[in-house]
Image: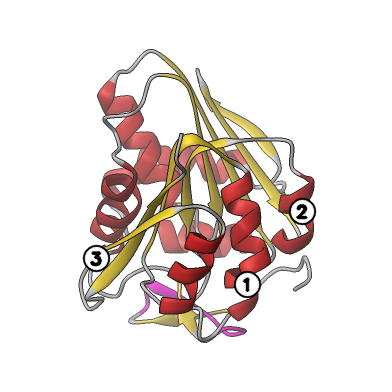
Amino acid sequence: MQDQTVQIDWRDGRVPVSRLFDDPYFSLDDGLEETRHVFLAGNGLPGRFGGDFHIAELGFGTGLNLLVTWAAWAAAGAPGRLRFTSFEAYPMAPADRATALAAFPVLAPLAQTLCAATAGGLGRHDLAPGLMLEVITGDARATLPQWAGMADAWYLDGFSPAKNPQMWEPALLRAVADHTMPGGTLATYTAAGHVRRALAEAGMEVTRQPGFGRKRHMSMARRPG
């Protein structure tokens, strides 16, 4: 994978689909509820917010996961900071991001802030008091092993393992495990057996849980400690 802007098609005029991977960026059923079910509930959020909490993500995409997390963090009113680090090989064009996020009017104020901050490019942005976003562009197989951070929670939101197998390689999943705090967690929409096995082999305690919408199952994992 290379760092380049992704080309988008639109399904029903509102759901962005990557031409490269032929996969939608969020659920055709309800992208907002999918994020809440898979990534928030899957990581025990917002109940764990507080102190200096760090979320890391594979696949920034539209930024929807960030916005849903931001809204939950703000509503929780927990003291401390929230850091959100995302690894993205194919950044979405700013205009496409704005169009995609317009499908979620409840998040409009946050989306406007995000789109304004990233209009000139991704990277590091202080989006609100106590909230820092960093998007690291490039192939995560190269950038994640070099990352100095440790996450309390991971969102694994790359395109489907069947269509983007590079994002689900055992070495990359081991790097995710290695960059998870003891007691930290991860969640992903996929329950593919090879993904769960790779996470288990990397030392994570993996469970399969009910998925969202058309997906019967999803995966959650915890690093012992």
Other residues around mark 1 within 10 Å, as few (<14) / some (14–19) / many (≥20)? some
Residue type for callout 3: Asp
Q: How is the image coloured?
A: secondary structure
Tell me the mark number nearer the camera, choosing from 1 and 3: 1
Question: Which residue has dot 1 on it?
Answer: 169
Q: Which residues are magenta?
A: 13-21
Other residues around mark 3 within 10 Å, as few (<14) / some (14–19) / many (≥20)? few
Which callout, 2 or 3, points at the residue further toward the start of the chain?
Answer: 3
Residue type for callout 1: Glu
Whether label 2 touches label 3, CB < 8 Å: no
Task: State the residue at coordinates (57%, 50%).
Answer: 177
Question: Which residue has dot 3 on it?
Answer: 30
Q: Quadrant of residue 104?
A: bottom left
Whether label 1 touches label 3, CB < 8 Å: no
Question: Which residue has dot 2 on it?
Answer: 143
Residue 217 in the image, given as x and y percentages of width and height: 26, 71
Task: State the residue at coordinates (26%, 30%).
Answer: 47
Q: Is residue 132 above or below residue 201?
A: above
